[in-house]
Structures are given as structure tokens and as C-alpha cells.
Image (cartoon, grey):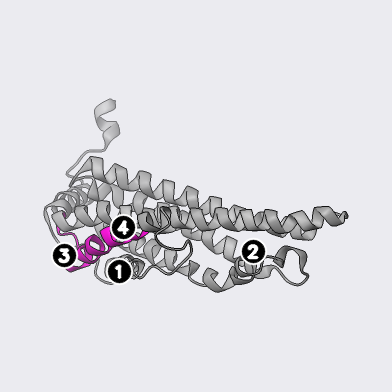
Amino acid sequence: MDSMRKIALVAGVFYLITFISIPTLALYGPVKNHRDWILSSGSHTGVLVGGFLEVVVALAGIGTAVTLYPVVKRENEGMALGFVAARVLEAGMIFTGAVSLLSLVSLRQNPGGAAGAKASLVSIAASHVAVYNWAFLLGQSLMPAVNALLLGTLLYRSRLVPRVIPVIGLIGAPLLICTVIATLFGGLKLGSPMPAALLVAAWELSLGVWLVVKGFKPCSLTTGITATDRRLDSGQVPPITAGMA
């Protein structure tokens, strides 16, 4: 397996891992939909599992950008670096949202003894849920659209994958950005479903599956790297340390 195939495989696996956060839609349901959840008793395992899954997704998202960067930078280094930065920013927002809900678990376990303190916890819980919703809007709705524009353009130009795959992302990204802007200015209710997100999700899923199953298509970007690998394997390229002796 050459280096290009390894890069494609690892990047594809990272993309598929980012979909493990889908269960959080149900796991976070009780804390998001019931204002008095923080005062109730019972298990909070769902919130903990949801937080863990989102941490994994955030790290996997960074992994996709770091893995693909050495390849796509050969097409446009500025856009490739922007993709890495956008992924890191997205991960930071995901962490922010996860921490806002995980902190409610601590408050639920130690609510305080005063009746007034317990009553104020409902307002605190509502504010934490609001932080999560806004972090989700900017981190897991807006940033994936930005990522689709950056990486989709790089892959479309380079032909590393069939062009129909990045086209899906390039179509869905502007629609999702418009939806986020409408939500930001009150045109849509915060937390309402975003059908445009399905196109961006389809782009990321199809990209992940293609990279795992097929890898990169032969093109000018892969030819140079593969040729260098072959020269290294055959001993035609001297090691770096040889020129430093």
C-alpha cells in the first residue's frame, strides 16, 4: 500500500467516524427538551455518552484536515491551510457545546440546599442549553458548510475524487450558509431542522466511503508523490542526512 492509498484510507475512516455523533440527537433530548431536567433524578448517562461522542467527532474532524493537507496543499496551499484552520475552529465550537451540557451533570449532582438556589438552576440550565444550541449552529452547521466550500473546491479542481462528490458539497454549502444566516437573524427558529444540512452530510459521507473503498484517483497531484515513494523504495533518492554529513 503506497502513501497515497494510506492517506486516503485514514482520511476516509476519519470522515466516517464523524458520523458517530448522530445518536446525540436522542441522547441530549431530555436535557434539551425539559427545563426541569436539572432538578430531576435518574440517570444522566445519555448526556455523558453524548459528550464523549462529540469529543471523538471533534478530534476526527481535525484528523480529516491534517491527513488530507499534505495532498491538497499541492493544489492550493492557502485553501488547504484554511481547511485545517476551519476544522480546528469547528472542533473548538463542538467542545464548547459539549462542555455546556456536561457541566449541567455536575450541577445536577450537587444542586445546593437552598430552595432559591434550586429554582435558579432552571434558569442556569436554560442558559447552558442556549449556549449549546448556538455553538451547534455555528460549529456543526456553519463550519461544515465552510469546510465543504474549501475542500470541495480543492477536490473538484484536482480531480482526486469523482467530481460529482465535491459538487454535492458545493451545492449544499451555500444553501446551508443561507439557512444559518436566516436562523442567526431570527428568520428561522434556533434548533429547527435544516434540510440543507443533508446535502453537506451526503457530501461528507460519500467522500468518506469513496476514500476508504477506492482512494484517490490518479492525477497530477498523486503522480509526483507516488513517484517519489517509488524512488525512495528503490534507493534512488538519498536520505536527507546524507547531504548533511
Residue type pointed to by label 2: Leu
Let me know if residue 111 appears in the view.
no
Is disc 1 in contact with disc 3, using a CB cutoff of under 8 Å?
no
Measuring from the top left, give residue 102's x and y in whole percent: 64, 57
* Residue at image coords 43%, 68%: 19
Q: Earlier in the sequence, mark 1 or mark 2?
A: 2
**Residue ID for mark 2:** 48
**Residue ID for mark 1:** 199
Give, as a single range, the part of the protein colored magenta. 158-179
Is disc 2 in contact with disc 4, using a CB cutoff of under 8 Å?
no
Residue type pointed to by label 4: Cys
* Residue at image coords 35%, 51%: 65
Disc 4 crowd, CA 10 A, few/some/many (<14, 14-19, 20+): few
Q: Which mark, residue 163?
A: 3
What is the CA distance from the residue labelled 3 to the residue labelled 4?
Answer: 24 Å
Q: Secondary structure at mark 4?
A: helix
Q: Secondary structure at mark 3?
A: loop
**Residue ID for mark 4:** 178
